[in-house]
Image (cartoon, helix red, strand yellow):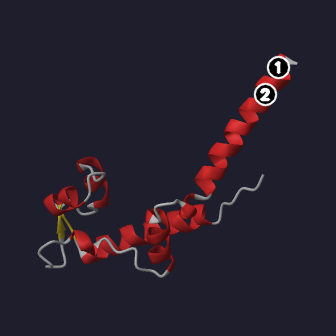
Amino acid sequence: MKKTGFWIGILIMISGANLAYANHHEDGDGSHAKKCESMAQGTSSISGLDVNKDGLITKKEYLDGDAKNTEKTFKHIDANSDGQLSLSEQQEIEAVYIKIHQKHKGKTTSI
């Protein structure tokens, strides 16, 4: 009987985690929902990081724009390694963001 209870507990924990992950669009604070809505409308632009509005995002602008942004990530997305993200590099990044979002947005879990 103890083994059955153990496995039921594990199953409930896994189901709960999957449900929370799949339904992140419905968080109480609405922050994820707003991000998701803008991505669905094709406005997943990172151009807001371009502080001086010159059309280029420098490494400093990228790092200062969001605490989650890292130098390592910047190096990966700066395709030509010139220290800034051109409009074409920004568009490539945005396309990837949209694909990732669409892949995960369709996941739903029901218990």
Q: Which residue corresponds to the image point at 45% horizontal and 71% vertical from the top-left?
A: 34
Numbered marks: total: 2
Residue 20 tag number: none
Q: Which residue corresponds to the image point at 24% horizontal and 63% vertical from the top-left?
A: 80
Which of the 4 quarters of the picture holds residue 57?
Answer: bottom left
* Pick the front one: 13 or 107: 13
Residue at the outermost right position: 1
Q: Which residue corresponds to the image point at 20% horizontal and 55% vertical from the top-left?
A: 63
Residue 75 sits above or below residue 26 on the image: above
- For label 2, count other residues whose C-alpha is less than 10 Å away and answer few (under 14), some (14-19) or many (20+): few
Residue at the outermost left position: 52
- For label 1, count other residues whose C-alpha is less than 10 Å away and answer few (under 14), some (14-19) or many (20+): few
* Cβ atoms under marks 2 and 1 closer than 8 Å: yes
Residue 103 sits above or below residue 3 on the image: below
* Pick the front one: 110 or 84: 110
In the rendering, at what x and y percent does residue 9 appear? 74, 31
Residue 3 tag number: 1
Residue 7 tag number: 2
In the rendering, at what x and y percent does residue 66 appear? 26, 57
